[in-house]
Image (cartoon, rainbow, N blue to C red):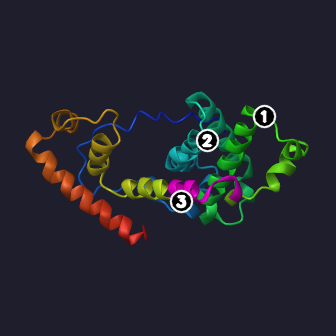
Amino acid sequence: MDSQVNQPDVTDEGSPTDAGENEPRGISDWSDTRLVRECLDGNERAWDALIQKYKRLIFSIPIKYGASPDDAADIFQSVCLELFSELGNLRKAESIKSWLISVAAHQAYHWKKRKRPRDVELDSLEPEVAEAQIPATEVLAPEMLQQIQEEQCVREALRKLSPRCEEMIRLLFYSDPPLPYVEVAQRLGLATGSIGFIRGRCLKRLQKILGESGF
């Protein structure tokens, strides 16, 4: 595996596709357990898929702490490098999401500590000791942790949609500023009049997936 990881492009939501609504995603559909196992076996595509799956989750945490995009990108790289070095020591592969949230939260927390007046009691400790003594639940406010988990739940649900539905929802709801139907239709190669109908079907499918996941 190559430990060099490119920072996520938070403005790039993917390219339009005319793929069918039931086209399988292949490696991106693998469970975390399988992705981790394949990563440890040296499968670079699995490593890329794992980072792709969680890059927005990792990047979003320092942003919530007030980090600039550049600082958030540095934290993202640091988290990915720690993942690369510690993946083999992960006790439960299915807990990787919680592990990533914890590592990113601690790194963002310490970034923010360096940006404000130093706390003598905390900063008198060695960094690794200080981090070990601060549970992730204390580093992250409960409402922030819940928001992070919900956002990731939506991301994972989006990835279970057909490529066309995922792209449409990203174009309609994640673009800033919002795109008009005419532009969305052009990007997807669809008739403008069909956008509303397809949008409704895609949202219903997303709602069903979220419901099945307990959202």
Q: Mark 1 points at which residue?
A: 117
Decide: is 75 above or below 131: above
How far apart are labels 3 and 2 at the CA level? 15 Å
How far apart are labels 3 and 1 at the CA level? 28 Å
| Residue 118 magenta | no
Residue 204 horizontal/vertical position (percent): 25, 62
Q: Is residue 198 visible to us here?
A: yes
Q: Give the range drawn in magenta.
A: 138-149
- Which of labels 2 and 1 is toward the front? 1
Q: Name the residue under label 2.
A: 65
Indicate the quadrant containing the N terminus: top left, top right, bottom left or bottom right: top right
How far apart are labels 2 and 1 at the CA level? 16 Å
Q: Is residue 45 visible to us here?
A: no
Q: Is mark 3 on a helix, strand or loop?
A: helix
Decide: is 114 above or below 83: above
Badge 3 vs badge 2, beta-carbon distance below 8 Å: no
Q: Nearer the viewer, residue 31 or 130?
A: 130
At 56% across and 43% down in the image, what residue appears?
64
